[in-house]
Amino acid sequence: MTLVSTPSVSPSPVSPPEFSSAQLHELRLLLCALQDGIRSALVTARDTEAAADFAAIAAVTEADTIYEIDKISEETIFSWFETNWPAQWPVQLVMEGIEEDEVVTFPRGTTLERTVWKCILDPIDGTRNIMYDKRSAWALGALARQRGPQTRLSDVVVAAMSELPTAKQWRADQISGIRGGGAQGLVAEMLDIRGGQSAPLLLRPSQARDFKHGFASVARFFPEGKSLLAKLEEDLWDELYGLGSTTSPLVFDDQYIASGGQIYELMVGHDRMLGDLRPMALDKLGFKSSLVCHPYDICTAMLLQEAGGIIEAPDGSPLDIPLDTVTPVAWMGYANETLAAQVRPILRRLMQKYF
């Protein structure tokens, strides 16, 4: 679909109006409905098209490689916004597939200075998983009060993430929420995509006091930087527990190529720690690569925080990044504070050593 750009105009410095809980809930439902549409379009296309076509390269942008499977979701998104987005809440759309210098707003023709919301999306987070039908991908979305280029992750007040299942799955999970409501304010459901029935999904980050006999890892998805990242992680576990201290491994590794999927694994208690240090490793090695986490990949971080987990910058400071499509993002996620406190001082030293 051809994107129609409007001139880039700095938004008004006037703060957007306050929204009631009911209105924020309506916005949450809108994000969920959008993601339902993405999932339906993907499932329909998979049933009618050759799966191999999904892996064909459609375009290469500054942010990432765009595959044919991504184009299916993009067409669904623009059609959905045209038809369903409330005209009284003008919005700027920022997502993978929209170039950084393009400005896309709804209703169409709205100038950027009149938008109230910035909506950041990753239509398919985990494209490489789902285009080969290996593992679920995720549709990610968040809404932040519009502050132009100053809009940051901390401005997000509504977020939703929806599972895009493999062909053999009948269940797809969906999690959404509003900032400030805590775990009780999250809506988590297991959806039966065959008939539309739903059931509650339990969100409970691990309460483990250590990493022994649990899953925890640092992302090293691609060849670039893999050995450096592996060495750092090996040193981390060596300092915590000693390598070879037992005949059976104490910590298990799982490389889920989707930041949204990683956040999900922390929220439901599968993993105790997950982190992504690729931007620092690639910079140290001199690699110029787009294959890192971007703001749209991590836009649902709020949901993990509301569920009781922790997501932060690798040095332990708050993770607060601009909501754009090109900023490289390094982050660490933990199931609870006890686990985070064990890793932080060691990780700081190791980052100074390696990066």
Image: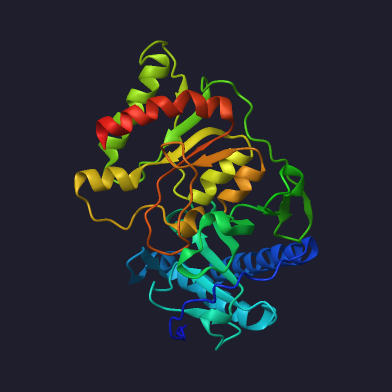
Question: In the depicted view, which residue is nearer to us: 26 or 12?
Answer: 12
* Quadrant into which the C terminus falls: top left
Camera sees residue 273: yes
Residue 275 at x, y percent in the picture: 44, 39
Residue 227 appears left or right of 4: left
Quadrant of residue 197 within the rendered picture:
bottom right
For the question of whether residue 135 can be seen, the reply is no
**How was the colour assigned to the protein in this rendering?**
rainbow
Residue 124 in percent (x, y) is at 51, 61
Q: Quadrant of residue 205?
A: top right
Residue 192 in picture, x, y percent from top left: 72, 55
Please name whichever residue, 57 or 75, is drawn nearer the observer in this view of the structure: 75
Q: In which quadrant of the rendered view does residue 208 lie?
A: top right
Specify the farthest residue to the bottom. 109
Above-or-below relation of 257 to 64:
above
Image-based side of 63 in relation to 183, left or right: left
Residue at (44%, 48%) from the top-left corner? 257
Percent from the top left, x then y, of residue 299? 53, 56
Residue at x 66%, y 45% (from the top left corner): 306
Residue name at image x 53 percent, y 48 percent: 261
